[in-house]
Each structure stands twice: as structure tokens, then as C-alpha cells.
Image: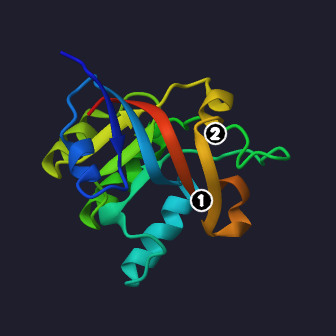
Amino acid sequence: MARDRRIDIDEPNGLDALKATGLGDLVYISGHIFTARDQAHVRLIEGLKQGKSPIDLSSAVIYYCGPTPAREGRPIGSCGPTTSSRMDRFMEILLKYGLRFCIGKGERDQKIVETMRRYEARYFIAPGGAGAYLATKVVSSRLVCYPDLGPEAVFSLEVRDFPIIRLI
């Protein structure tokens, strides 16, 4: 039976609470998440293989998103989810380096589902086509790395009551 839950992922045990959600649960998360798309994944993996990474994957929630520039007075522009299957080729190596939580849109390949289960990782979906609405849930946005990638750079977003649904 799906439930509605509010979880502050920055609080002690916040990620444990996120991990304990059930399939189909609607979760409103508050805290910090990172954006990353295809090219950022390539660079993250290159850095990880060299023993350096701009983010600690073991405590990260990665949101597959390439936000648009912020309008005046707003922390971010539209920030809807990117199709998650585009990140499937990177999933297992990121799981090996500690990633356990990701957010995107759409289904994942069965092999990815099995791999995520093996690593006890969780996949959540955000509402597609709702980028402007999701932007209202972003309190602040900060560039973390790879500025040359533009909207595909890695950003740290502070979110409040950001709606996601657990799919895997």
C-alpha cells in the first residue's frame, strides 16, 4: 500500500528513511540533491577512477536534470527530470562507488533494475512535464563542477517538499 511521506534527507538518518520507503510511495524530500546528466556522469566516473570526486556518492541523491537559467529573483529556471534510461550505461559503476539514490523519469531496463536491487539502491521518479512546478520547490542552487557543460554541469540544489515516487 503506497504512502505519502515527508523526509528531510539532510537530517541524521534521513537517507535511511529514504531507503526505507516502499514501492509507489509518494515522498516529499527536503535537503540537498545534485543534478547530473550524461556528460557530467562521464566526468564523474573519470574522476572517481582517478581517486577524486567533487561529490561523495555514498551520501548523494542524484537528480537527472539539466536546469534552465534562473529568472531574476529565482534560484533556478525550469528543472524537470531527464529520461533516466540515458544514464543506464553509467549506473553500475556509480553504484560500485557508493551511489544509492537517483531521481529521473521513465522506466529502467530490467538489467538496471536487477543491478540496483543487488546494490540495494533506490530509484525515484519526478513528475515529467512539470519543470516549472518543480522549480518552485528549489530553495537555492549552486554550481558544483564542470561549468563548461552549461546546464549539464553538476549543481547542488536545496529543495523543500520536492515530490518523488519510488519506482525501484
Residue for badge 1: 155
Q: Amino acid at mark 1?
A: Phe
Residue for badge 2: 79
Examine the image and state in which quarter residue 20 appears.
Answer: top left
Q: Residue at x 46, y 74 (%)?
A: 46
Q: Is residue 44 left or right of residue 56?
A: right
Q: Is residue 37 visible?
A: no
Q: Residue at x 24, y 18 (%)?
A: 2
Residue 165 at x, y percent in the picture: 36, 28
Residue 137 at x, y percent in the picture: 58, 37
Query: Label 2 neighbourhood size at 10 Å, few (<14), some (14-19), many (20+)?
Result: many
The one nearer the camera, 130 or 42, is 130
Residue 140 at x, y percent in the picture: 63, 53
Q: Amino acid at mark 2?
A: Cys
Residue 154 at x, y percent in the picture: 58, 61
Query: Label 1 neighbourhood size at 10 Å, few (<14), some (14-19), many (20+)?
Result: many
Secondary structure type for disc 2: loop
